[in-house]
Amino acid sequence: MKDEINDYINYVYIEKKLSNNTKDAYLNDLIFFDTYVNHKPINEVNKNDITSFINHLYDIKDSSKTIARKLVSIRTFFDYLMMMKKIEVNPCETISSPKLQKKLPVTLNEEEIEKLLNFKPNTALEYRNKAMIELMYACGLRVSEMVNLEINDINLTDNYVRIFGKGKKERIVPIADVTTNILKEYLTIYRNGLLKGYLTDKVFISSYGKGITRQGFFKILKEIAKERGIEKNFSPHTLRHSFATHLLEHGADLRSIGEMLGHENIKTTQIYTHLSNNKKRKDYDEFHPRNKKGV
């Protein structure tokens, strides 16, 4: 199955223009499956193999979300093999994905965001760190979008950033004035000193002189959150969720938020209405004079 997997990965990366992260996820899922079925030839893999694999994933305590993703990887792989006339039937055809529990995303409230960003940078690395977090929250970026930003993607004159999201789809997102100011200081005064002789167009530079990684940013974010006394367990993606939720709470149009997030379907953005409604309910319960016990 190894050769077919490599052909498929090249196909999704080049023809479908999927991101490196998605490509790597597909590859890891398919290699894991191939190992589980003991490198069975593709035309011998059947429904029982798929069902057994799914049961194995449950046994090793994979979440429903992870199992659903792995099943998608396998299903689309066999769809490709059918398209290439290498098999006649997709063994996943009659297998349903596990039901997913809908979980509302974790967000930081506005006080926590203020606490996270309310520090005065003194060193080049601190200016970089503040600029990264400000930009993530100001524009609702995915961490992969932030670390892949290049100098020409940021327009500090007209205050916008050009993002290449999933499927390399381009979108333009405005930048807040406070974010523009910290970016200007970082880019004009501190960035070149971090390069250490290396040449790269990446906006955010690691302490090694090259573009910062997703893992590197996550580590920095956790350290700053701990320093600022934020106890909530959150990830870089939480900044994106917080961006959308806070815009909605302050009256922004749902479709505009979706466009800034790079959502193709408004239904994807609608999860933030649940978060906003939860806050409305909480505010009502706390502040409405007719909602007090004993009244």
Image (tube, rainbow, N blue to C red):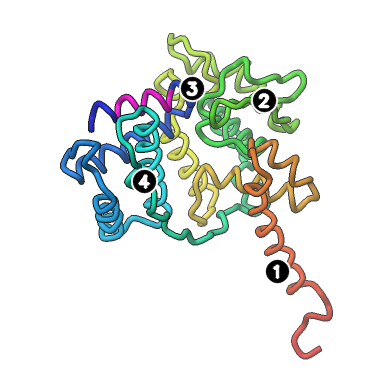
Find disc 4 in the rendering and name its residue: 70
Find disc 3 in the rendering and name its residue: 205
Picture coordinates of residue 101, whole percent (x, y) = 49, 61
Direction front: furthest residue = 88
Amino acid type of the residue tagged 1 in the rendering: Lys
Q: CA distance from mark 4 to mark 3?
A: 33 Å
Kindly identify the residue that appears in the image at 46 percent across and 9 percent down.
199
Dot 3 falls on a residue whose secondary structure is loop
Category of crowding for the residue at label 1, using alpha-carbon neighbours closer than 10 angstroms: few (below 14), some (14–19), many (at least 20): few
Kindly identify the residue that appears in the image at 48 percent across and 22 percent down.
205
Label total for image: 4
- Contact check, label 1 and label 4, Cβ < 8 Å: no
Q: Earlier in the sequence, mark 1 or mark 4?
A: 4
Dot 1 falls on a residue whose secondary structure is helix
The answer to whether residue 58 is left or right of residue 220 is left
Q: Earlier in the sequence, mark 3 or mark 2?
A: 2
The answer to whether residue 260 is left or right of residue 78 is right
Direction bottom: furthest residue = 294
Amino acid type of the residue tagged 2 in the rendering: Val
Q: Earlier in the sequence, mark 4 or mark 3?
A: 4
Give the magenta range. 5-13
Find disc 1 in the rendering and name its residue: 282
Q: Which quadrant holds the C terminus?
A: bottom right
Category of crowding for the residue at label 2, using alpha-carbon neighbours closer than 10 angstroms: few (below 14), some (14–19), many (at least 20): many
Direction right: furthest residue = 289
Kindly identify the residue that appears in the image at 55 percent across and 21 percent down.
203
Q: CA distance from mark 3 to mark 1?
A: 41 Å
